[in-house]
Structures are given as structure tokens and as C-alpha cells.
Image: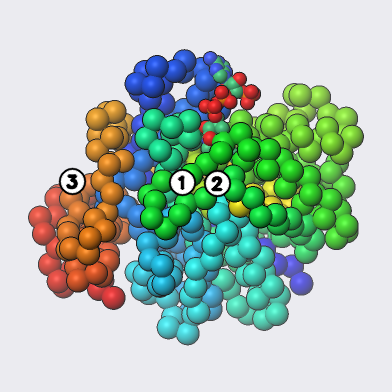
């Protein structure tokens, strides 16, 4: 039974900060961000954007042309969830009008829960091939203001439909994983920003990569030389270069620096402009590879490594399906990135400091540029999501009951 990714879409907020502005404010050479870390811009969510609105916007696109009644599972992967109990996917389920018989739940393990969700969905579809599963991975990567992690922030979501006889990427059965209890990155419930030991997290990423690779080999996976491209979890794009060099060197593979770069370069295009999207990052890289490269990758094998701090890693592979290009939304994704508004540093700071009120009182979010959905505010401890019909430049003064999805 061939199972895998049938469609894949990306959504990222309508605002970004050019890292040249950040470099100036942080008194840091811009080359450190652009070359040393490999980032040029970072997506910044407006106050009326959250993991639900980003996820719903990505899913809206990925479901185009797909019969929604066939979706029997929605798995929402995030590490910037909006509720301790209710799955963010339930809001998305309602916003998208998915069938009530579709089970919906949220999964968590830092940046790699999206891959756990993918593996669960593959197993489910393999059991019953008439089923389709929708995976939404959505996150806001937020580090301390002025911290070393600040230039690696970002925000975005991917949504993918998993099916039998997939039209984009068949995922192979072998998957090697590794788990170890370490404190390299975490976010306690009482904090809005992650606590991170950056250098240690890179070390653990590389350790988890090799351990996952060895487990993958023991599972009967492909030889390294059989893959033509590699997608890595991208906390920042230089990480892929470090990871690939590490894997190549430690497997005794003979590849020049240029050959190594050719195997990962197209996976980095989108991330360089968006920044880290935690759970979505690996799949933003995969989409960047499929949409960004000149060469047709039909029938080529792609190796993928997912890492989630704390930590867990998984290495697995897939085969790009012939004719995949006709199914991509490349033009729309490029237009979305180009249409974003550049923030001044002051506006970035204002967006950053807008932390949802946590004292339980009601509030309304001002209207900014968003996609088809926005987070309008909170009333009686309930999050209010609005489906937009009016153009984004027509401000919504106050949320009226009838305009909102109340749960
Ligand atoms: N020109 C070019 N490169 C420069 C430079 C300059 N002027 N100044 C520094 N650099 C290079 C450094 O040499 C280094 O490259 P290297 O990794 O090849 O040695 C790179 O830029 C980063 O510099 P460094 O001093 O190590 O950065 P930092 O202390 O600010 O921390 C991170 C970088 C990634 C650890 C930090 O951004 C972070 O904590 N990020 C969040 C956590 C994370 O992403 N973890 C990854 C695993 S999940």
C-alpha cells in the first residue's frame, strides 16, 4: 500500500521584520544573521493572528479540490497552543466545515510532533485506504526580546492531506527515532517565551540526527547515497548545513561541499524569509524544495529529519511522485511572501509586546492584515474567530455576535 502526502500548503502572517533592522538595533553585524545563522527576514504575527488562524488558512488551501467528507482525522501539531485542554484543531474543524464524524486532536513534542502526527496518519490510512487525514502544524516561534534566539523567530503553518496513492510524496515505511530526556529548549506554562540553551540544542540536534539515522538503518531504510535531496528541521537555515555535513561525515560518505549544498539548498528558500515555524519548519523545507527548484524531482528520493527539543528525533524518507508540480500552489506562496508588509522596529516591538491578556477579562483585537480567518478577541473566556468576507483594509470596529464562531 502506497501512502503519503497528497497535498501540502503554507500560510505565514502578513508582516515581517527585515533582519537588517534587527541587526542595527542589536548592534550586531548583519552578516552574522544572513551568513552565520542564514536568515534574512522573520514573519511576525499580528495580535489577531494565532496558531488557529494560521492553521485554518493553510488548511483552506490544501483542501482545495479534495472532498472534505473523506477527511476522517484532523491532527493539530503545535507547541504554541492556545488552550491547555481544548485542541486548537477543533476551531479549525469548525472554521473549515469538516464532517462531525472526523476525529480531531492535538499532539505535542516540541518541533517534531508534526512528524509523529504524519506517522500516525500514515498508519491510519494504511489500515483503511478510503480514509484521508488532515495534518495542521502551526506555530509562533518566540524567544526573549533581545536574546540570542531573537533573530531566529518566525511564524507560520503548513497543512497536508495524507492519503493512499498520494500525488505529492510517497512516505516510506522505515522511520528511525530517538528519545532522550534533556533540557535544551522548553516553555513552562507560566512563560510566553521559550527557555533555550542554544548551543546545547544544536549539540542535541546533531546527536539525535545520528541516533535516528542508525535506528533508520536498522529498520531497513535506504542507503544515504540513494537520496537525491535532504530536508531537515530548520530552526534557522544554517542548521541544515551543519546537520547535513555531520551526517555525511559520520557515515563516511564522499561528497564535496558543493555536492552537499546542492542536496539541501532549495529546501532553505522559504525558511530564510519566514524564520522558524517550529512544528511546520521541516515541511516548509519540503515545500520549498518542491516549489523552489528548477529540476523536476519526480521519482527522486528525499531523506527527512525531524527534531524536537527535549528531545526526540525521527529520520525517514519519501519518493516525490511524477507530475507533482501540477498540484503545487507555488505562485500563491510566492505572492503571499511578496505581499507581506515590512514592519518598523517599533511596530515589531508593539506586536511582540502584545501578549494576550491572561487575567480572564474580555478583549477585542484590532484588525490587521490576515488571511481568511482572524482571532477577534476573547469573550467570557471563549476565543472568538472571525471568517472574513470584507477586504483587510476595511477595519472591523467591534465584533458583533453573529459574525463570530463562538464555541
Ligand atoms: N559574519 C559572519 N558570520 C558570523 C559573524 C559575522 N560577523 N558573527 C558570527 N558569525 C557566525 C558564527 O561564527 C556562528 O557560525 P558557526 O555556527 O558556523 O560557528 C554563527 O554566526 C552564529 O554565531 P554564534 O555566536 O554561535 O550565535 P549566537 O550565540 O548568537 O547563537 C543560536 C546562535 C542559533 C544558538 C541562537 O540563535 C539560538 O539560541 N537560537 C534558538 C535555538 C535554536 O535555534 N536551536 C537549534 C536547535 S533546535
Q: Is mark 1 within 8 Å of ligand 1?
A: yes
Q: Position of residue 211 (x, y in %)?
A: 79, 49
- Whole-number angstrom distance, CA of label 3 to CA of label 2: 38 Å
Q: Quadrant of residue 358?
A: bottom left
Return the residue nearer the eye: 364 or 125.
Answer: 364
As drawn, 199 above or below 168: above
Q: Earlier in the sequence, mark 2 or mark 1?
A: 2
Residue at figure coordinates x 43%, y 83% from the top left? 100
Q: Residues within 10 Å of mark 3 (few under 14, many from 20)?
A: few
- The residue lying furthest to the bottom in this view is 101
Q: Are marks 2 and 1 in contact (CB under 8 Å)?
A: yes
Looking at the image, in which quadrant does ligand 1 appear? top right
What residue would you read off at disc 2?
185
Residue at figure coordinates x 29%, y 35% from the top left? 348
What residue would you read off at disc 1?
194
Q: Which is more foreground, mark 3 or mark 2?
A: 2
Q: Earlier in the sequence, mark 1 or mark 3?
A: 1
What residue would you read off at disc 3?
393
Q: Say what secondary structure mark 3 lies in.
A: loop
- Whole-number angstrom distance, CA of label 2 to CA of label 1: 7 Å
Amino acid at each position: 500500500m502506497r501512502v503519503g502526502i497528497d497535498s501540502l500548503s503554507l500560510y505565514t502572517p502578513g508582516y515581517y521584520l527585515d533582519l537588517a533592522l534587527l541587526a542595527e538595533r542589536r548592534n550586531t553585524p548583519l552578516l552574522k544573521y544572513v551568513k552565520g545563522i542564514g536568515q534574512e527576514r522573520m514573519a511576525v504575527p499580528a495580535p489577531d493572528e494565532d496558531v488557529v488562524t494560521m492553521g485554518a488558512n493553510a488548511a483552506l488551501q490544501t483542501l482545495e479540490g479534495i472532498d472534505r467528507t473523506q477527511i476522517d482525522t484532523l491532527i493539530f501539531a503545535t507547541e504554541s497552543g492556545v488552550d491547555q485542554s481544548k485542541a486548537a484543531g477543533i476551531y479549525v474543524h469548525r472554521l473549515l466545515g469538516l464532517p462531525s464524524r472526523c476525529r480531531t486532536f492535538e499532539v505535542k513534542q516540541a518541533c517534531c510532533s508534526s512528524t509523529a502526527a504524519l506517522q500516525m496518519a500514515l498508519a491510519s490510512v494504511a489500515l483503511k485506504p478510503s480514509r484521508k487525514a488532515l495534518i495542521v502544524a502551526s506555530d509562533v516561534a518566540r524567544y526573549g526580546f533581545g536574546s540570542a534566539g531573537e533573530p531566529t523567530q518566525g511564524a507560520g503553518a503548513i497543512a497536508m492531506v495524507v492519503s493512499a496513492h498520494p500525488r505529492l510524496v510517497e512516505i516510506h515505511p522505515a522511520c528511525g527515532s530517538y528519545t532522550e530526556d534533556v533540557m535544551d529548549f522548553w516553555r513552562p506554562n507560566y512563560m510566553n517565551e521559550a527557555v533555550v540553551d542554544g548551543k546545547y540544542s544544536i549539540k542535541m540536534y546533531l546527536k539525535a540526527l545520528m541516533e535516528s539515522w542508525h535506528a533508520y538503518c536498522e529498520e531497513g531504510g535506504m542507503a544515504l547515497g540513494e537520496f537525491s535531496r535532504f530536508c531537515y528541521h530548520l530552526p534557522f537555515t544554517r542548521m541544515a548545513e551543519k546537520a547535513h555535513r555531520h551526517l555525511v561525515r559520520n557515515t563516511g560518505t564522499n561528497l564535496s561541499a558543493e555536492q552537499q549544498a546542492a542536496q539541501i539548498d532549495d529546501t532553505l528558500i522559504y525558511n530564510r524569509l519566514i524564520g522558524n515555524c517550529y512544528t511546520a519548519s521541516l515541511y516548509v523545507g519540503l515545500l520549498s524544495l518542491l516549489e523552489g527548484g528548477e529540476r523536476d524531482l519526480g521519482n527522486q528520493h528525499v531523506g527527512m529529519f525531524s527534531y524536537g527539543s527535549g528531545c526526540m528525533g525521527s529520520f525517514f524518507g519519501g519518493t516525490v511522485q511524477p507530475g507533482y508540480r501540477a498540484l503545487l500552489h507555488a505562485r500563491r506562496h510566492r505572492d503571499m511572501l511578496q505581499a507581506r508588509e515590512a514592519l518598523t522596529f517599533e511596530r515589531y516591538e508593539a506586536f511582540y509586546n502584545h501578549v494576550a491578556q491572561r487575567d480572564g477579562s474580555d478583549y477585542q483585537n484590532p484588525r490587521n492584515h490576515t488571511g481568511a480567518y482572524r482571532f477577534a478577541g476573547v469573550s467570557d473566556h471563549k476565543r472568538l474567530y472571525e471568517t472574513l468576507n470584507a477586504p483587510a483594509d476595511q477595519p472591523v470596529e467591534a465584533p458583533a455576535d453573529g459574525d463570530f464562531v463562538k464555541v
